[in-house]
Image (cartoon, helix red, strand yellow):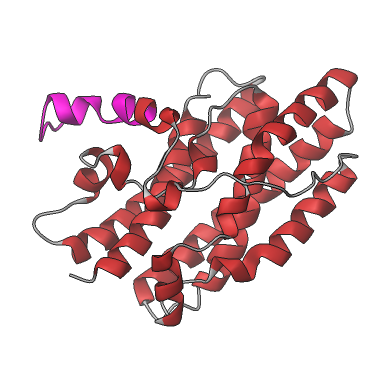
Amino acid sequence: MDTIRLNYILHLADNALILGHRNSEWCGHGPVLEQDIAISNIALDGLGQARNFYQSAATIAGNGATEDSLAYLRDVIDFKNCLLAEVPNGDWAQTILRQFFFSAYQYLLYTKLQQSNDGQLAAIAEKSLKEVSYHLRWSSEWVIRLGDGTEESRTRIGNALEFLWPYTGELCLPAGYELDAASNGYGVDVSSLQSDWHQRVSSVLEEATLAVPETGWMQSGGKQGRHTEHLGYILAEMQYLQRAYPGAEW
């Protein structure tokens, strides 16, 4: 079993799954019907991306692994998603800004991953990029709308920026398996995305009349399985049915 390749693909899958699950919590609770549908569709896109990555990972893992067992039967320490994906939704502004930060990252990541020498990863990246392009445009417009809007909307997006910024450093801080994947031609060295990510994010924040925070100490550890307490609650809810009734089918 190619453990490094497996870890790399699980990292991609876990990011999409956990962020998709977080967004799904807004279903039926969006501020207006149109945006409720939009965030629900973005959640479904994330789950679809996760399925594709997990299916690829399952062929490497062997031993009867499936997309379902990889999503529902692994423990917290086995997940390799970035911490940003698992932080609470908070209010609409915090959810929007989290999506913007992550979409800006995924857009750059999937653009480069299309050049992977792993044909399956390249194909998943190509399909996912079309979805993420919309996610990025949608979230960018909302960041600008909130930042350059009313006094309350500006306060809320400002608070979200202060809270979320320390979680963004991990996005472009490569784990060992990411560096190995890049050197073997099937992955992306995410450190190479840092400059473009910061430039894209800064441009939107400037249009939103928001100041880019000073970059100081950053949270990290998610890629190595060291998570916040929030992931445990996510998995307890998401994995309950499969663990309570193993192998259950509709």
Nearer to us in this view, 165 or 146: 165
Q: Quadrant of the N terminus?
A: bottom left
Rendered view: 15 above or below 75? below
> Residue at left 39%, top 82%?
184
- Residue placed farthest to the front in the image? 217
Q: Is residue 245 left or right of residue 113?
A: left
- Locate residue 198, reporting x and y percent: 74, 58
> Residue at left 37%, top 76%?
119
Nearer to us in this view, 166 or 233: 166
Q: Is residue 230 left or right of residue 143?
A: left
Image quadrant in which you'd find residue 9? bottom left
Q: Which residues are magenta?
A: 234-250
- Locate residue 124, reporting x and y percent: 42, 64
Rendered view: 54 above or below 27? below
Q: Is residue 134 visible?
A: no
Image quadrant in which you'd find residue 120? bottom left
Magenta segment: does it hold 238?
yes
> Residue at left 74%, top 45%?
140
Rendered view: 28 above or below 81? above
Nearer to us in this view, 2 or 68: 2
- Locate residue 217, reporting x and y percent: 66, 46
- Locate residue 230, reporting x and y percent: 44, 28
Q: Is residue 137 left or right of residue 184?
A: right
Count of numbered marks: 0
Magenta segment: does it hold 40?
no
Q: Quadrant of the C terminus?
A: top left
Q: Is residue 19 left or right of residue 58?
A: right
Image quadrant in which you'd find residue 47? top left
Rendered view: 246 above or below 113? above
> Residue at left 23%, top 71%?
2
